[in-house]
Image (cartoon, rainbow, N blue to C red):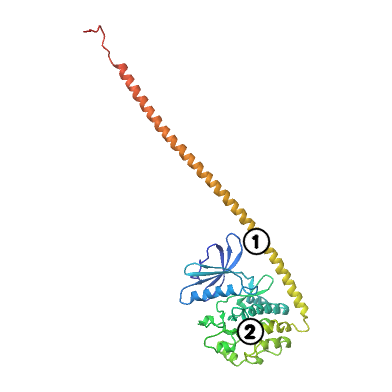
């Protein structure tokens, strides 16, 4: 089925490939035409009231919260009727990673799980404690967590985010994903997101990663709503290792006042407790160190690529200048050729004129020779 958005590609980009499509627009993988760098482009139509406000808000949030754990904004392009947000391209989503392991009936290795949760928490903490005002992500779920090639995570889709002191009128689609909504947000008619509701969403996400199942596995929407409003610790099985269950319960605490904060999870070391004594902290540190080494290697590779790109751009400029010089010479030669052609035409005209004159002279000469001149003596007076 062809989407109305198909073909809406921002200028300067090519080779589009659809990654995802939702109620607000579609996400494409594209290639920058002269550098070859691949980006993700979110193409959003501005069809109804509020669309422009949502798009502007997402661009503002991405600009404000520039951080290694939040998707990097490359540029925003107005295409007249459509808005394109060009962003860093993730290697894959956390949802893809979870599904890969679930298909093999395996769980994601605990050190990798904790590292990803720490990365997510770093992004949330940056938003929750930002100097411009505390801001909640509002739609934390596996689809909105992207992974780089080294499996380091970063957040995306900040369209529903806004500082807590700003009152937003959200549509149903902007009120987060019900499965990941906290009890207090589900009961709020305005669907207001808070740092505490983000922590709940992180807990639901963590539960999925460590158990391979949804927190409300097998429940339809109505049953899920009831389970959410009557949530207690029995929902988290005791079969889960105690050190992991303890941290999950701190994130999935129905009482907002008692729920863990991102600062406690990260700076207080709660997430690292999930590793337990049988998985030494040094193992995770080594795991993180290995990924940091990979990040440095990737950065060096990026630098080399940029250097190569700059060199190619310089060569391109030089070729353009040489081309312009050749074009100028060509124009000069064309002008000289035109002048020569014009002169040739003039000479041909003159030659025709001379030939006509010669013909006339020849004709007169024949007439003169054919004339009969009088003979005999001439009388004179």
- Residue at 68% x, 86% y is 248
Q: Does residue 2 appear to the left or right of 278 in the view shown? A: left
Q: Is residue 183 visible?
A: yes
Residue 12 location (% of width, % of height): 55, 62
Instruction: Identify which residue, 36 or 199, lies in the foreground.
Output: 199
Vertical position of residue 31 compared to residue 266: above or below: above
Q: Does residue 334 appear to the left or right of 126 in the view shown? A: left
Q: Secondary structure at mark 2?
A: helix
Q: Does residue 175 appear to the left or right of 248 in the view shown? A: left
Q: Does residue 278 appear to the left or right of 337 in the view shown? A: right
Q: Secondary structure at mark 1?
A: helix
* Extreme residue toward the front, this view: 131
In which quadrant of the rendered image does the C terminus lie? top left
Q: Quadrant of residue 203?
A: bottom right
Q: Quadrant of residue 206?
A: bottom right
Which labelled disc corresponds to residue 306?
A: 1
- Residue at 65% x, 61% y is 306
Q: Is residue 106 visible?
A: no
Q: Which residue is mark 2?
A: 199
């Amino acid at each position: 089925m062809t989407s109305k958005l198909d073909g809406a590609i921002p200028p300067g980009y090519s080779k589009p490939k659809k990654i995802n499509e939702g109620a607000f627009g579609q996400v494409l993988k594209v290639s920058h035409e002269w550098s070859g760098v691949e980006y993700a482009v979110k193409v959003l139509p501005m069809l109804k009231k509020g669309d422009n406000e949502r798009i502007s808000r997402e661009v503002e949030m991405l600009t404000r919260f520039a951080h290694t754990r939040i998707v990097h904004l490359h540029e925003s392009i107005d295409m007249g009727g459509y808005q394109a947000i060009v962003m860093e391209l993730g290697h894959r989503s956390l949802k893809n990673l979870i599904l890969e392991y679930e298909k093999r009936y395996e769980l994601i290795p605990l050190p990798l799980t904790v590292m990803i949760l720490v990365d997510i928490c770093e992004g949330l903490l940056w938003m929750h404690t930002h100097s411009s005002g505390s801001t909640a992500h509002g739609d934390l779920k596996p689809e909105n967590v992207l992974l780089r090639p080294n499996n380091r995570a970063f957040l995306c889709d900040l369209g529903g985010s806004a500082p807590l002191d700003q009152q937003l009128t959200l549509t149903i689609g902007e009120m987060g994903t019900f499965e990941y909504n906290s009890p207090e947000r589900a009961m709020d008619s305005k669907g207001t997101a808070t740092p505490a509701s983000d922590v709940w969403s992180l807990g639901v996400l963590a539960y999925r990663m460590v158990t391979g199942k949804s927190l409300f596995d097998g429940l339809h929407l109505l049953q899920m709503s009831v389970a959410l409003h009557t949530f207690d610790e029995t929902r988290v099985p005791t079969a889960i290792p105690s050190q992991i269950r303890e941290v999950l319960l701190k994130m999935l605490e129905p009482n907002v006042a008692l729920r863990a904060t991102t600062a406690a999870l990260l700076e207080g070391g709660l997430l690292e407790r999930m590793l337990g004594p049988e998985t030494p902290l040094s193992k995770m540190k080594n795991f993180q160190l290995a990924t940091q080494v990979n990040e440095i290697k990737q950065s060096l590779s990026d630098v080399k690529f940029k250097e190569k790109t700059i060199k190619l751009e310089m060569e391109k400029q030089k070729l353009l200048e040489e081309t312009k010089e050749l074009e100028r010479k060509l124009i000069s030669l064309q002008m000289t050729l035109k002048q020569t052609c014009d002169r040739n035409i003039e000479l041909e005209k003159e030659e025709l004129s001379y030939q006509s004159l010669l013909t006339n002279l020849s004709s007169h000469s024949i007439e003169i020779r054919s004339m009969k001149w009088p003979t005999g003596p001439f009388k004179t007076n």
